[in-house]
Structures are given as structure tokens and as C-alpha cells.
Image (cartoon, rainbow, N blue to C red):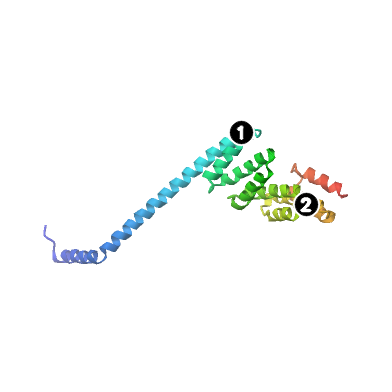
Amino acid sequence: MALDLEEQEQVDELKALWKKYGTYITRAAIVFFVLYGLFQGWGYYQTKQSLGASELYQSLVVLDEKNTKEILEKSQRLINDYSGTPYAGRAAILFAKASYAEGAKEKAREKLEWASNHAKESATESIALIQLGQILLEEKKYDEALKKANAVDNEGYLGLSNDLKGDVLNAMGKKEEAKKAYLEALKRFGPKDSYARFTQEKLESLGV
């Protein structure tokens, strides 16, 4: 069927526009589909990573804590293969605990440092800082231990961080400052926290 004059003009205009901008339109479409494909692929990769990390972590937490060899192996694998997931930081904590149990304090400290710097969760970072501070306290590195305790900013762990602070200050001979730290820890713990009893005992040993 022959086109009327108006339709023919519209077709001619479209041809002219395509001739002028067709290359750009084609390129833009290609870029769009490439980016869309990458986005979809990245989403799939992220999901796969998360599932893989979750499965490995679940197999890790059910291990007997005496099975340090397998704990160390699985923890390190999780850290290596899934470092971008929250499970890596948790695995670093477990690795440190197993290393400490074997007497390898240096390895434990290294993993706690890693967790405190790379953990994706505030709670995991706080646990790493507190445990790191406890090791530094044992090594009589009091200033460094205090820095770790002071770096904790997660509300749920301020009781433990203040308790650690009290331990460090007490070891430094700063009894009054230690009392204040223990009192602050007790405020943060609340009456139902099982750890509060130990803090109370430390406080009473200082004459409060």
C-alpha cells in the first residue's frame, strides 16, 4: 500500500535522524545491555559468595573447639575465599581463639588485628578489639591495650571494653581510674548481665 505524502515525510525524517544519530543510538544500546549484564552477573556473584561463605561458616561453628587444626584450616579458607563477606571477620575471631589455645599468640594477634580493620560488622570489630586488648594486657603493653579498649564504639560491647580498661588501669597502678572504668562497665552491663559479677568482684577488691 502506497504511503500518503504525510507518512512519507515522517519516514524520510526518521531515515535522516537514523543516518545522523544511528551509530550513537546503537552504541548506547550496546553499552546499556553490557552494563545490565554486568550488573546481573555481579548480583549473581554476590549471592553465590554469600551462600558459599554461609555454608562454610556453618560447618565451622559446629566443630568441637578442641579440633583446632580443622578450625584453623576452615577459618583461613573462609578468610581467603570470602574476605568481602561478614563471615570472614567472624572466622578471623575463631582462628584467633584456636591459635591462642595452641599457644600461638602472635598468630592470634595478627588475625584479631585483621578482624578489627576489615570486619564488616560492628559487633565483630568490637570483639576483635577487646580480645586484642586482652592479649596486649597479658604482654604488659598497657598503652596499646588502652587504645584498643577506647576504640570500641558498639553500644553492646561498651561494658566489656570498660571492664578491659579497668583491668589495664589497675595493672598500671591507677586504682582510682580503674574504679571509674569498672563502675562505667557495670552501668553498661546492667543487672542481668552474667559478666557483671566478675566486674563487681574486681571493684570490691579495690575497696569499693
Question: On the picture, is 45 further left or further right than 26?
Answer: right
Q: Which mark is residue 63?
A: 1
Question: On the picture, is 27 further left or further right than 48?
Answer: left
Q: Give the secondary structure at mark 1.
A: loop
Label 2 close to label 1 by CB (< 8 Å) = no
Q: Which mark is first along the chain, 1 or 2?
A: 1
Residue behind mark 2: 168
Question: On the picture, is 24 further left or further right than 159?
Answer: left
Report x, y in % for residue 57: 56, 39
Residue at horizontal 60%, vertical 42%?
91
* Front one among 130 and 79: 79
Disc 2 packing (10 Å; few <14; some 14–19; many ≥20): many
Q: Is residue 187 visible?
A: no
Residue at horizontal 29%, vertical 63%?
24
Residue at horizontal 61%, vertical 50%?
114
* Front one among 150 and 192: 150
Say above or below: 200 vs 61.
Answer: below
Q: Which mark is residue 162?
A: none
Disc 1 packing (10 Å; few <14; some 14–19; many ≥20): few
Report x, y in % for residue 173: 84, 54
Q: Give the secondary structure at mark 2.
A: helix
* Front one among 168 and 19: 168
Residue at horizontal 11%, vertical 57%?
1
Q: Amino acid at mark 2?
A: Val
